[in-house]
Amino acid sequence: MELDALDRALLRELQNDARQTNRELALRTGVSPSTSLERVRALRERGIISGYHAAVDLEAVGRPVQALISVRIRPPSRPVIEGFREWAAQLPETIGLFVTSGAHDFLIHVAVPDTNGLYAFVIDRLTERREVADVQSTMVYEHAQSRCIDPAPAERPAPSRRRR
């Protein structure tokens, strides 16, 4: 989907502060409030803006310990993979889930109260599932996230080459 400079500016501003008023957004992007409102509505309708979310401090909600857990599933069939994905995604400890290629089938990002909570999650939850063939856990010391994701540049046609 083609995004112009105004779309990009609106996306940047909204990612930095989605709670700002439309008037503030318009002021920061140099357009009228009606233009800002219309363009943001169009970005939502096109599926570019998929929602607005509250950022939660994991330590403040009692889940300061994070880990990335690689899981290999056997047998690697679509029903088994989809069943595990649905089960793992709904667990309260899961804050992110990736279906991956390579040596493991999943990478699960979890947040737990402490290392005992992580141990219990791996031993009592994951390894109790008969389709789980292997689990590897990696503790997260720090999680730095980009708060602003710029759209990929529009593809430009390659310059034509002239024959001499």
Image (cartoon, rainbow, N blue to C red):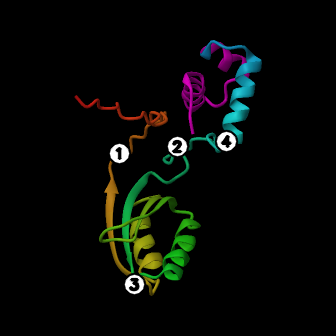
Answer few, some or many: residues within 10 Å of disc 1's Cα (few below 14, many 20 plus, some between 14 and 19).
Answer: few
Between discs 4 and 2, the one toward the N terminus: 4
Mark 1 against mark 3, which lies toward the viewer? 3
Marks 4 and 2 sit apart, C-alpha to C-alpha, by: 30 Å
Marks 2 and 3 sit apart, C-alpha to C-alpha, by: 35 Å
Q: In the rendered view, would you say 64 is above or below 36?
A: below
Between discs 2 and 3, the one toward the N terminus: 2
User: Is residue 131 visible in the rendered structure shown here?
Assistant: yes
Along the horizontal axis of the image, is 8 left or right of 103?
Answer: right
Between discs 4 and 3, the one toward the N terminus: 4
Between discs 1 and 3, the one toward the N terminus: 3
Q: Is residue 163 magenta?
A: no
Answer few, some or many: residues within 10 Å of disc 3's Cα (few below 14, many 20 plus, some between 14 and 19).
Answer: few
Q: Position of residue 95 (x, y in %)?
A: 51, 56
Per the rendering, the mark at residue 46 is 4
Marks 1 and 3 sit apart, C-alpha to C-alpha, by: 31 Å
Marks 4 and 3 sit apart, C-alpha to C-alpha, by: 39 Å
Element marked by disc 3: loop
Along the horizontal axis of the image, is 61 left or right of 69?
Answer: right
